[in-house]
């Protein structure tokens, strides 16, 4: 069966695969099917990968077996029956052996052999690999299928090695039965491995001491027979079920909720939590609320309900409290599923040592010394985790082009394209590599997707006459940025987790997996392939080819919003009245924005009647700087409260009183009614600054979109009229010109909410053709010298981007101080969608910081 490490290693193959776990086995099968010669190497004596090594008591999968299995062969699925919802390690290993035998894979695997070094030979366009047996293999393609959690962390505890008793590592558990009967046992570590083995070790040991550095969120697995509902769905439509898994967020088909933890009533919150608790599945508890992954308040509801359960289970209140995680959001460290974990601490011979209170000082010959006591043990079990994701890859001496090593390139964190390849290392592939969904997903779904993509890619290279593939620096930088953008909108970076590399001393803090979802990732990989392998350079006898580019440039939350809005009707197909009603309906369900000190409504005199305003006051004692704000809506839509969340946000971030003024709208009141109203409002607010709680002489104007147009125009009118004095102008995605022919209209004129057609609709309602070129309609055509300093914000995917940029440039050329903020990956509506487009928040922070330079010193400080 095993032990064929000394069987002849072919000197030359098409593909070398490292690892004979789930990934390596399927890859071998696929490659063989495509007629590639391939050999796999594994240090273990048999197949299994992670399931070969992690044999500790209680080791099980924590994705239901209905889903934690290959789906590539329906017959394989029919022939194998899992005995439990979550199978034990021996059963999973038996499955993998069955697969190896069924497809006769062992003949191409060399066991007990490690690849120690790999170097790219540019002349031959091949990898030269060295094995732990001193052999050499040359291959065209080199694939690391070595698992994300396969390099155990070296013990980083003082005195490690001094202890003379029995030592066990969960990640390298002996093959022989370990008997803890009658023994005093210590377990160090309370991650998934510790939480699985602790209850079973407690059943045997005379005394068990658990050393916990960070408490973990764990929920009951409710193990038993495989879930009948999932079995029924599989039986009814196996392929439909698998396809749903492939296009799900985590690789397991689950109900996706739109219930927000922030807005759901308490009863519904509890109901949803209880249902997830009873389901005993990771993706259920991770998906109680739509926003728990990025909204701290929503997340805290789930976290606190789990803590309630822990306190209700563990009788000793001090122990219960120590077992409750409190300093990181739920889900941001890998949550665990357990069987009687918390109950175990009610047993009289089990004790928890909270290392936060009494840290380990050193291991001794007999046991462990903490800051509080000296403890003796017959056996110590280290469940201390792994150098995850990057560790196994950089542990091999991999040298790419120009002598650069992978470890060197990734010194400050991994950089990859799609988590599949990395620039400078041609023909080198990773299965479930960093910056792919991998550990955040059902690994089986992610493994099959990666293997299929790579196998299809190799076949395509062969068919099209290429023999070298490498991602371009541009494509890789774009993917690294997209990964960071995805992580930035979540709470994940708040935890010291192995996802962040934080568990290994000295490892760079970078969020390692791709968190955009299995579905989004699959779509991305498919698109890359469909675009002629976008971002890859291909070389071979057929010549060279490169369709260079970045696959994802729009902010991830903007993409989600665009997908949700795709089915909504376009405003430009409606009447003005219907457009207003449509917008009101959308506004009615948006998050409210932050609390401010006070909100008051009022009216001020306009040239043709009263104008309504809404005033937002900071909670601090005034007077405050004052901002007159004009809402967006193409001079047709909106009112003094239509940008309410944005005005609240502006008030909170700047510490200014914000007065959002309504103005007359087209088509009822066409140009220049809105301009007349806006200027009258600024004059009145300046004259009444003190009464409104503003610092006299510190009035700024601000506006978004058409409101930005009015703000810009108002500044020109105030300058020409000799007052009022305006301290600064904030122009957020402003309309500055009537020319709809600028390149950003063709680049971004469709698909990003504000369309060219909608801008035309707005202009047609607002102003006659003959009036549009006036400076009061197109301020870019006015005289710009002598205007107040400006903050001009443009969004990359806004049709108005170019005219905003043009205005900033023209202001600068006219000697006006300008701070330009370019919102990368954003659209016209991104920044005003407070608490919806999370990635807009840092841009608003930058905007507020820029505005603060206009304020008097106390606020700036
Ligand atoms: P882990 O989650 O990294 O947990 C390691 C534990 O050891 C943590 O509690 C950690 O504390 C502690 N620790 C590490 N170094 C320590 C030190 N020097 N002193 C004291 N405590 C120390 O590792 P794991 O439990 O092996 O799990 C790793 C991952 O493997 C899991 O998250 C999961 O993805 C996978 N896994 C899955 C299953 C399954 O059910 N299918 C089972 C096992 C593992 P800190 O948190 O403070 O660092």
Image (cartoon, rainbow, N blue to C red):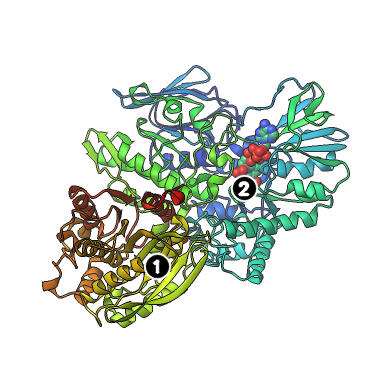
What residue is disc 1 on? 659
Give me the residue at 57% from left, 56% from top: 296
- Say which quadrant the N terminus sits in: top right
Occupied quadrant, residue 56: top right
Say if residue 93 shows up in the picture. no
The part of the image, by quadrant, that contains residue 262 is bottom right
**Image vertical order of residue 114 relative to residue 185, above or below:** above
**Residue shown at 57% from the left, 28% from the top:** 43
Quadrant for residue 278, please give it: bottom right
Circle nearer the viewer, 2 or 1: 1
Which of these two is toward me, 521 or 820? 820
Q: Does 589 sit left or right of 97 as displayed?
A: left
- The secondary structure type at the circle numbered 2 is loop
State which tag comes first along the sequence, 2 or 1. Answer: 2
The image shows residue 284 at horizontal and vertical percentages of 61, 59
Residue bearing the label numbered 2: 328
- Nearer to me, 765 or 798: 765
User: Residue 283: where, in percent of width, then height?
Assistant: 59, 56
Label 2: how many Cα within 10 Å (few below 14, some 14–19, many 20+): many
Residue 632 sits above or below residue 190 on the image:
below
Q: Is ligand 1 within 8 Å of the beta carbon of the residue shown at mark 1?
A: no
Return the x and y of residue 364 as percentages of the image width and height: 78, 22
Within the displayed image, which quadrant is ligand 1 positioned in?
Answer: top right
Residue 381 on image: x %, y % = 74, 33
Whether residue 778 is visible: yes
């Amino acid at each position: 069966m095993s032990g064929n490490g000394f069987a002849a290693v072919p000197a030359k193959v098409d593909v070398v695969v490292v690892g004979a776990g789930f990934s390596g086995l399927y890859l071998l099968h696929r490659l063989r099917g495509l007629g590639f010669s391939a050999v796999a190497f594994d240090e273990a004596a048999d197949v299994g990968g992670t399931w070969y090594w992690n044999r500790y008591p209680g080791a099980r999968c924590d994705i239901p077996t209905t889903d934690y299995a290959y789906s590539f062969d329906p017959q394989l699925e029919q022939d194998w029956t899992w005995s439990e919802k979550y199978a034990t390690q021996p059963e999973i290993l038996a499955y993998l052996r069955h697969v190896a035998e069924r497809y006769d894979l062992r003949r191409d695997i060399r066991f007990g052999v490690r690849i120690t070094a790999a170097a790219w030979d540019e002349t031959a366009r091949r990898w030269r690999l060295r094995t732990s047996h001193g052999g050499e293999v040359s291959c065209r393609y080199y694939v690391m299928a070595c698992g994300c959690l396969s390099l155990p962390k070296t013990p980083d505890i003082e005195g490690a090695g001094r202890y003379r008793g029995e030592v066990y590592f969960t990640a390298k558990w002996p093959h022989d039965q370990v008997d803890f009967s009658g023994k005093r046992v210590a377990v160090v570590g309370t991650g998934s491995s510790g939480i699985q083995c602790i209850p079973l070790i407690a059943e045997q040991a005379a005394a068990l001491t658990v050393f916990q550095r960070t408490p973990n969120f764990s929920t009951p697995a409710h193990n038993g027979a495989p879930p009948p509902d999932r079995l029924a769905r599989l039986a009814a439509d196996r392929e439909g079920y698998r396809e749903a898994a492939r296009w799900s967020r985590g690789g397991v088909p689950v109900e996706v909720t739109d219930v927000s933890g922030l807005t759901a009533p308490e009863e519904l919150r509890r109901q949803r939590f209880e249902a997830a608790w009873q389901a005993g599945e990771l993706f259920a508890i991770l998906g109680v609320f739509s926003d728990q992954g990025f909204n701290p308040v929503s997340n805290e509801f789930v976290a606190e309900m789990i803590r309630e359960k822990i306190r209700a289970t563990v009788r000793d209140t001090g122990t219960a409290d120590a077992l409750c995680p409190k300093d990181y959001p739920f889900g941001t460290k890998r949550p665990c599923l357990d069987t009687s974990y918390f109950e175990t601490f009610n047993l009289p011979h089990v004790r928890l040592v909270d290392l936060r209170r009494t840290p380990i000082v050193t291991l001794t010959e007999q046991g462990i010394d903490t800051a509080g006591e000296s403890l003796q043990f017959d056996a110590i079990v280290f469940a201390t985790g792994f150098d995850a994701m990057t560790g196994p890859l950089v542990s091999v001496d991999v040298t790419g082009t120009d002598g650069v090593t992978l470890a060197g390139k990734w010194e400050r964190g991994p950089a990859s394209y799609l988590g599949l390849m990395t620039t400078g290392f041609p023909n080198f592939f990773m299965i479930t590599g960093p910056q792919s969904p991998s550990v955040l997903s059902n690994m089986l779904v992610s493994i099959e997707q990666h293997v299929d993509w790579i196998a299809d890619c190799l076949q395509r290279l062969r068919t099209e006459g290429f023999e070298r593939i490498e991602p371009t620096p541009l494509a890789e930088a774009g993917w690294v940025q997209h990964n960071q953008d995805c992580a930035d909108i979540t709470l994940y970076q708040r935890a010291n987790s192995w996802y962040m590399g934080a568990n290994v001393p000295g490892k760079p803090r970078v969020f390692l997996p791709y968190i955009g979802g299995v579905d989004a990732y699959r779509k991305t990989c498919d698109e890359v392939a469909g675009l002629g392998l976008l971002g890859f350079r291909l070389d071979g006898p057929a010549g060279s080819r490169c369709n260079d580019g970045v696959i994802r440039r729009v902010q991830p939350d903007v993409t989600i919003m665009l997908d949700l809005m795709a089915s909504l009707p376009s405003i430009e197909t409606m009447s003005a009245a219907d457009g207003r009603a449509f917008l009101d309906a959308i506004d009615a369900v948006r998050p409210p924005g932050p609390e401010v000190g006070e909100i008051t409504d009022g009216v001020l005199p306009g040239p043709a009647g009263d104008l309504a305003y809404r005033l937002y006051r900071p909670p601090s004692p005034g007077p405050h700087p004052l901002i007159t704000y004009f809402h967006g809506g193409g001079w047709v839509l909106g009112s003094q409260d239509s940008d309410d969340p944005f005005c609240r946000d502006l008030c909170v971030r700047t510490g200014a009183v914000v007065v959002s003024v309504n103005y007359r709208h087209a088509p009822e009141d066409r140009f220049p009614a809105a301009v007349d109203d806006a200027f009258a409002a600024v004059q009145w607010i300046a004259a009444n600054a003190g009464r409104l709680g503003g610092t006299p002489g510190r009035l700024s104007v601000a506006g978004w979109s058409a409101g930005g147009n009015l703000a810009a125009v108002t500044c020109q009118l105030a300058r020409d009229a000799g007052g009022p004095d305006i301290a600064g102008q904030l122009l957020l995605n402003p309309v500055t010109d009537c020319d709809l022919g600028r390149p950003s209209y063709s680049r971004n004129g469709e698909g990003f909410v504000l369309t060219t057609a909608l801008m035309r609709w707005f202009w047609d309602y607002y102003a006659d053709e003959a009036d549009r070129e006036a400076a009061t309609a197109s301020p870019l055509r006015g005289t710009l010298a002598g205007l107040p300093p400006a903050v001009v914000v443009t969004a990359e995917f806004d049709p108005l981007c170019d005219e905003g940029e043009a205005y900033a440039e023209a202001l600068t050329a006219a000697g006006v101080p300008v701070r330009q903020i370019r919102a990368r990956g954003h659209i016209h509506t991104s920044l005003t969608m407070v608490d919806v487009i999370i990635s807009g928040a840092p841009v608003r922070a930058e905007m507020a910081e820029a505005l603060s330079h206009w304020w008097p010193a106390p606020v700036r400080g």
